[in-house]
Amino acid sequence: EPEVTQTPSHQVTQMGQEVILRCVPISNHLYFYWYRQILGQKVEFLVSFYNNEISEKSEIFDDQFSVERPDGSNFTLKIRSTKLEDSAMYFCASTWTSGGARDTQYFGPGTRLTVL
Amino acid sequence: TQLLEQSPQFLSIQEGENLTVYCNSSSVFSSLQWYRQEPGEGPVLLVTVVTGGEVKKLKRLTFQFGDARKDSSLHITAAQPGDTGLYLCAGASDTGTYKYIFGTGTRLKVLA
């Protein structure tokens, strides 16, 4: 069964460093998302991406964040200068359409980012 | 701002008991998903409900979408220790790119 994959599973970095989190969405999917989950808190939407551009972003997704689809398979989230409060699980999700009512987002296993 | 409140937040029951988890909002959602999440892992889809009043069954799990598409419930019959986990509801926003709004989660523990 097709699945969303993410690498690395765990990333430890120093405050101020840049990190890139990678995702390989399900191959025929067209819409891609990043969410994050701070430990003990709920899953929060960060950004959605379609046709090589951002469709929607939350207030969390500030200038330190960027997303890219560098080739036909990868979808990346870059944090330019990490802060302690960026420590969280980051989940990538993909879906075939944004048909909303009848389309389901499939989530990857997540990358745990720890900022020291 | 669309919000989803889940109740209860925590639930500890004995094996064999029944339980219901609620997911409520004042907003209308175009669809609602239930996920189960294990520690350190991503949410795993259980079901999607789309139509107001819809009921779906997955073995011992019964999911219902409210008539007005503002709320949902998950009922587990004869709970087993394997049902232990974090249950999340997520509503698909009916605007923009259909981002998911996640509920606050219900942590279930089923004791043998």
Image (tube, coloured by chain):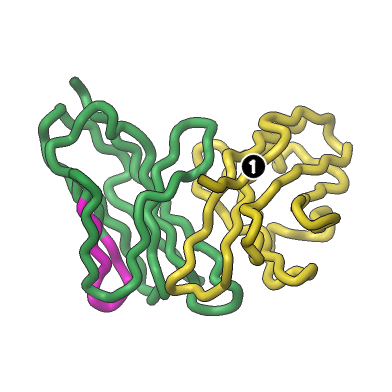
- Residue drawn at x 19%, y 50% as measured from the top left: B75
Q: Badge 1, how many Cα within 10 Å: few under 14, some, many 20+?
A: many
Quarter holding residue A57: bottom right
Could you tell me how many numbered marks the image carries? 1
Is residue B72 in view from this perspective?
A: yes
Q: What is the magenta range?
A: B62-72
Residue B62, image x, y percentages: 20, 53
Element type where label 1 sits in the image:
strand
Q: Is residue B105 left or right of residue A59?
A: left
Colour for chain A in the figure: yellow
Three-letter code, disc 1:
Thr
B56 lies above or below A6:
below
Colour for chain B in the figure: green
Is residue A58 in view from this perspective?
A: no
Q: Nearer the viewer, residue B70 or B98?
A: B98
Q: Is residue A91 left or right of residue B94?
A: right
Residue at the limit of the structure toward the top, as seen here: B112
- Residue drawn at x 75%, y 71% as measured from the top left: A51
Quarter holding residue A109: top right
Residue A17, image x, y percentages: 88, 37
Q: Is residue A52 left or right of residue A107?
A: right
Residue A49, image x, y percentages: 71, 66
Determine which residue is flagged by label 1. Answer: A5
A54 lies above or below B9:
below
**In the image, residue A60 lies in the stretch drawn in magenta:** no
Judging from the image, mark 1 belongs to the subunit labelled A
- Residue drawn at x 28%, y 62% as measured from the top left: B72
- Residue drawn at x 21%, y 64% as measured from the top left: B55
B86 lies above or below A64:
above
Residue A23, image x, y percentages: 70, 46
